Image (spheres, coloured by chain):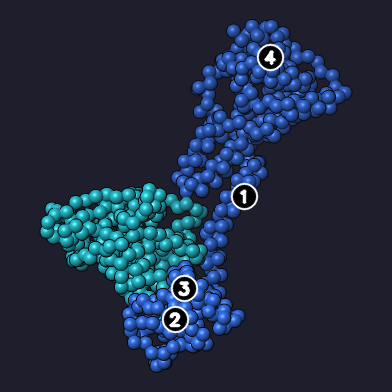
Chain colours: A cyan, B blue
Amino acid sequence: MAMDIIDYKIFGSETQYIELELDPNESAVGEAGSMFYMESGIEMDTVFGDGSANQGGFFGKLMGAGKRLVTGESLFTTVYENKGPGKAKVAFGAPYPGKIIPVDLSKIGGTLICQKDAFLCAAKGVSIGIAFQKKLGVGFFGGEGFIMQKLEGDGMAFIHAGGTMMKRELAVGETLRVDTGCLVSLQPSVQYDIQYVGKIKTALFGGEGLFFAQLQGPGTVILQSLPFSRLASRVFAAAPAGKGGGGASGLVGGSVLGGLIGGDDD
Amino acid sequence: MSRVPATAFGPGFASAGSKVEVDLSDYGLRLVTPEAFDGEPPWSHVKAEKRGFNDAQLMLSWSGESRSSGGSNYALMLSDVAAIAAVRAKLKQVQPGTKIGATKADATTRAWSHAMVWIGLIAPLMLIVALVIYSKEIAGWAAGQMPIATERQLGEKLWAMQKPGLGIVQRPVVNKMLDEIGTKLTQGSPYKYEFHLVDNKTVNAFAMPGGFVVVHAGLIERASSAEEVAGVLAHEVQHVEKRHSLKAMAHSLGLGIAASLIMGDVSGGAVVGAAQEMSRLSFSRESETEADLEGMKMLARAGIDPTGLKTFFRKMSEDTKLALPAILSSHPASEDRFALIDRELPKTVAGKTFAPLPYKWDEIKAGLK
């Protein structure tokens, strides 16, 4: 799979956008709806699936598209190709306040597991799949749910999350406890588990919920300081009363329990 | 000796791991790597465990020569299935009896997460399942708890909603007969009954909670004696007495609530919908049978020949073959039901004589016009 080497520049501080400079015939894939602007010479094409171009046949394409749907992306991927004679730029904007972080997949072993919706754009050839969380407890209480995104390839991928991003390389056996929901991405070598906060008093009144996400090295992890759900619930809480109904949750006491367990809804 | 791909972590390697190849010898691990790595950890120093996201990788860790940081400070992560199998085979050979387990969450974490899964998911699901399975029992119990005054209020509200669309008519002869038979039947009942005649050609009669009984003119038309009308009235009165419509309503409400819990719609749409569907509710077969049997007893107690109930419903079932009268869509006729009526009727009438009802049937029919 030939990867396109991309020159990029990130602009802004708290609400960022990224500008990719494409050489002639070079292309990039972007999350649908995230394109900000593009220069002449760049042509936009929508492909079914994830645009990694190596999916054989109709069935392969359908599988790729299905995976994208499950991870909360749209069915189609937009490919931006520079068809002009010179260099041209295309920019993608982040959907909410936060940071864009570039990840060179070749430097981290070719695979990165990300929070759902974290993907912003990438060099063409990076494929977006799903990583299904098989541990029941982690899926329910780890803050990232059961479905995560898996970016594979050896080019540059750009992910976005809320607040300030923190990238950390965990040494062998090094453990980091993280508030649930704050995990953005991890290398597959990192052990992702949940850990009880320790005391019933802390669990109930500590405001962090019943569990932490526990990350154990070796490997790279990327964390966000402000999960979007937390920002959204603060905005929602501050909104004038009566404008929005309480979000109906699927199961009895879902919101109550969610608040207790997740700890990041406030 | 086999060579497998792995990612190496530790001092001297890239912080996000370096791709290396490892030779698995009988003695231990030898890294084939561009980075200078001295040392060949023997199997006895190597710890093998399942690690990584979803425990999908195998981690081989050991302490370095320097021992500066203490503990395991080097690790090889294997993600390739064939490579993991090779290491397992080698380990079995050099260290028989070693088990490669996954690192387990501590007991408290497991206990809490299991408890929360139960409280948050499995218990509500079981509650919903129980609600669906035992919906009839629960509905029956709930309907039984409602005081008669409340039932009357509810009935009055429903009656007020229904009344304008029914086409109630006054036919003095017929109304008089309905009232008289009704009063005879419902003597000593805690309910206050009202009997209404509706100008509708379909053969039907229905009762609403609180004691509102409606008879279609078509039913009087089809009946051939006052005893048959009395039979239908007794049947409908029993629906009120046994609170069948309340039970049916509670039942469909319960199912509606269960459905809204599953669908996540707690806005009450289902509840309101169920209440509106109320007028179209049909009773369960058990309710119909109960109304038949209790109706016959009621007729006998009131001194009216219960044979009329049998003959009328029998007549209805024969009509089914021609057209489907409305009364049959809400009063399912089945051979079982008639068999039961046939069996119970002689017991009910045994040792009793009934005077015929004092109505001239031709005059009643003429009074419908």
CB contact under 8 Å: marks 1 and 2: no
CB contact under 8 Å: marks 3 and 4: no
> Does residue A194 appear anywhere in the picture?
no
Mark 3 → mark 1, Cα distance in angstroms: 49 Å
**Identity of the amino acid at label 1?**
Ala
Residue at 53% in and 57% down:
B121
Give the labeled residue for mark 1: B130
Q: Quadrant of the C terminus of chain A?
A: bottom left
- How crowded pointer 1 is (Cα within 10 Å; few <14, some 14-19, many 20+) is rated as few
Q: Is residue A103 above or below residue B177?
A: below
Left or right of residue B142, residue A12 in this image: left
SS class, disc 2: strand
Q: Nearer the viewer, mark 2 or mark 4?
A: 2
Residue at 56% in and 70% down:
B111
Mark 2 → mark 3, Cα distance in angstroms: 11 Å
Chain of the residue under label 4:
B
The earlier-in-sequence mark between 2 and 4 is: 2
Numbered badge on residue B83: 3
- How crowded pointer 3 is (Cα within 10 Å; few <14, some 14-19, many 20+) is rated as some
Mark 4 → mark 1, Cα distance in angstroms: 44 Å
Q: Position of residue B103 (x, y in %)?
A: 51, 75
Numbered badge on residue B223: 4
The earlier-in-sequence mark between 4 and 1 is: 1
- In this view, the residue in front, A7 or A264, is A7
Q: Position of residue B110 (x, y in %)?
A: 54, 70
